[in-house]
Image (spheres, grey):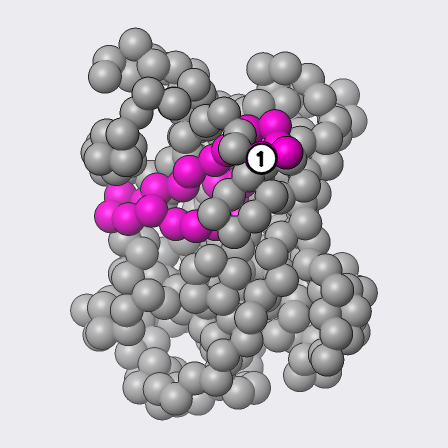
Amino acid sequence: MREYMVVDAFARTPLQGNPVAVFFDSSDLSSHSMQCIAKEMNLSEVTFVLPPEGKADARIRIFTPVNELPFAGHPMLGTAVALASTIPREQLRLETAMGVIPCQVASDGTDEALSVRMRQPVPVREPYEHAAELCAALGTSSSTVPVEVYRNGPRHAFVGLDSIAELSALRPDHKALTAFPDLAVNCFAGSEKQWRTRMFSPAYGVVEDAATGSAAGPLAVHLARHGLVSHDQEIEILQGVEMGRSSLMLAAAEGADQRLEAVHVGGHGVPVAWGRFHV
């Protein structure tokens, strides 16, 4: 039997946020078995904890129901919460295919939720040549700022909308979105410190995501790049409202356009389930 914990990431209360299943002591599992378990769990992501290969506390592998990801945000936060819930600690270094992710973990003592602040890989910006087709698949005419792609493991495209009402009213053509391989499509609206997002990614096996932590940092970079927020300013990102799974993420891009120094993302996570898997 194999033990796992389900954590609702980017939430302080159970049954909100984005759930991730964290499987402990997974060193004897093959890649094929991990992929089969992820498909069986049918969550947006599942993580597997292994012994580190370098100077870290653990190595983490991340699977969607259809593929493995080199990095993802809410699975990392959920894994940090799961590990710190079993053996209390304030610092964790989690090894991924994108490098070691330092995490600070804290509790205010009022509930079972833990807060996590992680330093994410600095995203690499790419030009995007299919903005018109992407907007058409989303059901919107254009983006408020140029559509650009940022890669920090997953590839995230960002499409700006005029209002939160327009964002909530989006009804994407999911079949049309399958024509955009290796792409998570993030739609956003808001101003100053407060932003709302929705993410659609048939390419990663996710119809809509309740919280996309790997997109939170790139969104802060994108907004700062286009003058909508300042560098070093922490923003609040609310996602998952339309799914009934409200998730709150904090993000900041430190440095400047030509010299981005660090990207930090934070939020809370709460354990909601424990179980054993017979495999």
Is residue 66 in view?
Answer: yes
Any magenta on residue 129? Answer: no
Give the image quarter of residue 216.
bottom right
Question: Would you place residue 86 above or below residue 182 in this image?
Answer: above
Residue at 67 percent of width and 31 percent of height? 92
Residue 20: percent from the left, percent from the top? 43, 35
Q: Is residue 61 left or right of residue 164?
A: left
Nearest the eye: 179 or 166: 179
How many residues crowd mark 1 within 10 Å: few (<14), some (14–19), many (20+)? Answer: few
**Figure disc tally:** 1
Q: Which residues are magenta?
A: 54-80
Q: Is residue 258 left or right of residue 273?
A: right
Nearest the eye: 122 or 6: 122
Identity of the residue furthest to the top in this view: 1
Residue at 32 percent of width and 70 percent of height? 171
Residue 89: percent from the left, percent from the top? 71, 22
- Name the residue type under label 1: Gly
Residue 51: percent from the left, percent from the top? 50, 25
Is residue 187 in view?
Answer: no
Residue at 24 percent of width and 48 percent of height? 66
Question: Would you place residue 209 above or below residue 261 in this image?
Answer: above
Q: Is residue 236 left or right of residue 230?
A: left
Identify residue for label 1. Answer: 54
Residue at 72 percent of width and 70 percent of height? 260
Please identify the quadrant where the N terminus is shown. Answer: top left
Residue 114: percent from the left, percent from the top? 67, 29
Any magenta on residue 71? Answer: yes
Please identify the quadrant where the C terminus is shown. Answer: top left
Where disc 1 sits, the SS reads loop
Q: Is residue 75 left or right of residue 191?
A: left
Give the image quarter of residue 94.
top right
